[in-house]
Image: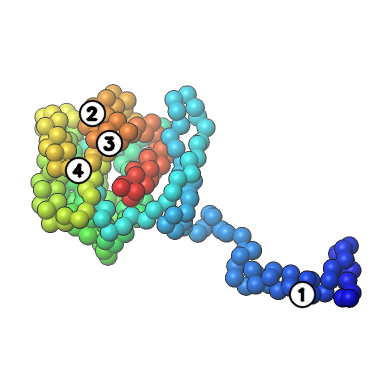
Amino acid sequence: MKKSVFFGGLFFRPDFLILGMAVVLGLLLAGGLTPFDFKNTPPSEGEFEAIPVVPAKGDKSLQLKPITFKQCGSTTAVDLVLDRSGSMGSKQDGGTKIKIEYLKDATKEFVNLMSGESLIGMQSFATTASIDFKIDKLNTRKDLINSKISSLSPSGSTNMAAALTYARDELKVAIPKFTEYKFSLILLSDGGWNVGGDPTNVINEIKGLGVTIFTVAFGDKTIVNFMKKSATAPSDSFYSPGNDELKAILKQIAQKICKE
């Protein structure tokens, strides 16, 4: 008969005690008992991440929604259409920075979610529009597009139609060139168009190309209905009442795009 050993207030058989200690040591060496650093370790594909969700009307509490994180992969294609009109030079929601600075921060975070094989393009609009970044694989060009985002400066009126026309033309070239990709467009503005005409027709043309349109109204409730009609579906339209919500909204859109 094997004798028991008194350990930690309990009696154990020596062979069981040795086996248990070996299992614990093995787990420690493999990292099985090491706490996971959720704050500093980015989630990998299939893991969960707490995404801030825009609170319901009247609810000022910060809500967290755990959703599956998925790195944007080799079939993700996104075209950004961004407002740089004069109103983007004003402060919003008591923020310390002007609105376009919050747009820049949120958009850069969005771009950083894309993989090198993702396609990305960017147009911006004020009184006139510009093609800031032609639709192509991101690869090592993240620094270049982030530089283009940083250079956005608010001025002038809101010619949404001109930027969307550029976007349509870019998409017409890119879609047949990259047939395996799923294309999306994100339209972000803090106000309705006031020069260049109604963009509804060109928006419908873009939808006709099979592109999913996401819209974000930033601070101005008067354009919410227009933005909902412009989006592919009501669930693809978002309203950001302030600066804090903008990053969360773009991150939710990124998650939606990457899951498709």
| For marks 1 and 3 on the same chain, the one whose residue lies earlier in the sequence | 1
Camera-nearest label, 4 or 2 = 4
Label 1 amino acid? Ile
Is 138 left or right of 206, judged from the image as shown? Answer: right
The residue beneath circle 3 is 215
The residue beneath circle 2 is 229
Residue pictured at 87% horizontal, 63% vertical: 10
Q: Secondary structure at mark 3?
A: strand
| For marks 2 and 1 on the same chain, the one whose residue lies earlier in the sequence | 1
Task: Mark 2: give few (<14), some (14-19) or many (20+) Cα within 10 Å.
Answer: some
Q: Is residue 259 above or below residue 42?
A: above
| For marks 4 and 2 on the same chain, the one whose residue lies earlier in the sequence | 4
* CA distance for labels 2 and 1: 68 Å
| For marks 4 and 1 on the same chain, the one whose residue lies earlier in the sequence | 1
Residue pictured at 21% horizontal, 53% vertical: 181
Seen from the viewer's position, the closer of residues 247 and 49 is 49
Q: Position of residue 127 (x, y in %)?
A: 15, 37
The disc placed on residue 106 is: none
Image quadrant where residue 207 sits: top left
* CA distance for labels 4 and 2: 15 Å
Seen from the viewer's position, the closer of residues 246 and 18 is 18
